[in-house]
Image (cartoon, helix red, strand yellow):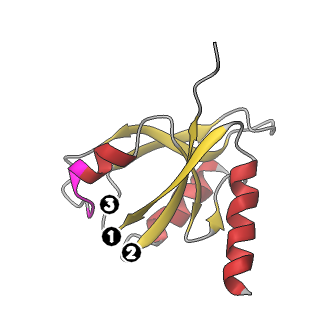
């Protein structure tokens, strides 16, 4: 039942993202090697959640391998949830605080990536 609830929460968070490809990355303890920025345009009058502004592969405290980071995460990817806790409805500062509070342990981050628009 708890696993089903977690899936439901993550699914709800990802459904708030318009036309996105979804994927997860497991980050070991330490920095995720990401610079984040607020997300605008998710149906709220103020920016919420966070997305990847740029990769920071030279971050000295980074816990993830730089090659793995570059192969999986790209600028513009939205962080939908961390360990099944939705981030898309949180204010940017609250989402970043949640991520920072977990830096000493392994965490699974659910991402949404904009799908290319058909031509």
Residue holding disc 3 = 31
At which x and y percent is residue 107? 44, 71
Give left or right: position of 30 versus 97.
left
Residue appearing at x 23%, y 61% in the figure: 61
Residue ID for mark 1: 28
Using the image, determine if residue 9 lies above or below residue 41. Answer: below
Q: Is residue 2 above or below residue 11?
A: below
Residue occupying image coordinates x 66% and y 81%: 3
* Residue furthest to the bottom: 1
In this picture, residue 31 sits left or right of residue 113: left
The x, y position of residue 5, in whole percent, is 74, 77
CA distance separating discs 2 and 3: 11 Å
Q: Which mark is residue 106?
A: 2
Q: Nearer the viewer, mark 2 or mark 3?
A: 2
**Element assignment for label 2:** loop
In the rendered image, residue 55, in percent from the top left (x then y), is placed at 33, 41
- Disc 1 to disc 3, how far (Cα)? 8 Å
* Residue lying at 63% horizontally and 40% vertically, measured from the top left: 20
Mark 2 or mark 1, which is nearer the start of the sequence?
1
Q: Quadrant of residue 32?
A: bottom left
Q: Main secondary structure of the magenta part?
A: loop
Q: Nearer the viewer, residue 83 or 3?
A: 3
Mark 1 vs 2: CB contact within 8 A: yes
**In which quadrant is the N terminus drawn?**
bottom right
Image quarter of the C terminus: top right
Task: Point out residue 14 in the picture as x, y percentages from the top left corner.
Answer: 68, 52
- Looking at this view, is 93 or 112 the one in front? 112
Q: Secondary structure at mark 3?
A: loop
Q: Residues within 10 Å of mark 2 (few under 14, many from 20)?
A: some
Q: Which residues, given as a range, are shown in magenta?
A: 63-67
């Amino acid at each position: 039942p708890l696993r089903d609830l977690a899936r439901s929460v993550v699914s709800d968070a990802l459904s708030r993202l318009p036309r996105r490809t979804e994927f997860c990355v497991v980050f070991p303890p330490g920095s995720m090697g990401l610079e984040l920025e607020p997300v605008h345009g998710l149906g709220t009058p103020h920016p919420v959640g966070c997305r990847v502004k740029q990769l920071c592969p030279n971050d000295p405290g980074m816990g993830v391998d730089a090659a793995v980071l570059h192969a999986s995460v790209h600028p513009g990817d939205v962080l939908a949830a961390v360990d099944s806790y939705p981030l898309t409805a949180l204010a940017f500062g609250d989402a970043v605080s949640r991520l920072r509070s977990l830096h000493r342990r392994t965490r699974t981050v659910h991402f949404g990536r904009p799908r290319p628009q058909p031509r």
